[in-house]
Amino acid sequence: MGTFLDLPADPETLARAAAGDPAASRALYDSLAGPAFALIRRLVRERMPLTVCPLSNFRLRVVPDLAAHPLRRMLGDGLMATINSDDPAYFGGYMNENLSAVALSRDEIVALARNGFRAAFCDDGTKQRYLSELDAYCLSRR
């Protein structure tokens, strides 16, 4: 697999990432600076998974409130966002609490689940099996 790419506010590091730093096969997302369009385009093009932790983003004051969290925008922009937890004891929630912290539609929740399976560190057959199970579950709940 690859290493995680932390997306710091440091412009030099953001520029290296946008230029295609080969060490990055996944990205750890806390906040993307608005002007980092080249990086965002690369993340979309390469379907690079982003770990998103809304509760820690709020507690660390990355967003002023959870209603302002960019997760919905990220999904709408085609980023491969996944929902995660960051130090649950400190930031106040595991994955499910992070998922329910942001107002999402059913389709957005399914997209996050699908992205999570696609980003998982397992073989393609296992990923496909879980994606098929997700599809079957969603069809049975319509």
Image: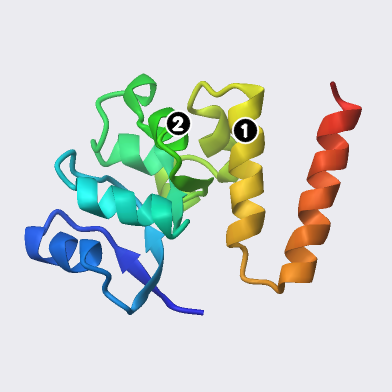
Residue at the image point whose x is 45% and y is 40% from the top: 78
Q: Quadrant of the C terminus?
A: top right
Query: Looking at the image, is mark 2 or mark 1 earlier in the sequence?
Result: 2
Which sits in the foreground, 128 or 59? 128
**C-alpha gap between disc 2 and disc 1:** 12 Å
Kind of residue sitting beneath label 1: Ile
Amino acid bearing label 2: Gly
SS for callout 2: helix
From the top left corner, tell me how far across and down residue 130 is, in percent: 79, 55
Between 92 and 15, the one nearer to me in the picture:
15
Question: Which label is found at residue 76?
Answer: 2
Left or right, residue 34 beside residue 95: left
Please tell me which residue is depicted at 25% across the width and 54% down the height of the picture: 39
Q: Secondary structure at mark 1?
A: helix
Q: Residues within 10 Å of mark 2 (few under 14, many from 20)?
A: few
Label 1 packing within 10 angstroms: few (<14), some (14-19), many (20+) = some
Percent from the top left, x then y, of residue 14?
17, 60
Does 116 sit left or right of 57 as displayed?
right
> Residue 31 at what x, y percent from top left?
27, 45
Q: Are marks 2 and 1 in contact (CB under 8 Å)?
A: no
* Camera-side mark, 2 or 1: 2
Location of mark 1 (residue): 109
Tell me where residue 116 appears, x and y as whole percent. 61, 52
Position of 50 with respect to 58 (left or right) is right
Q: Which residue is painted at 59% across and 49% down in the image?
A: 115
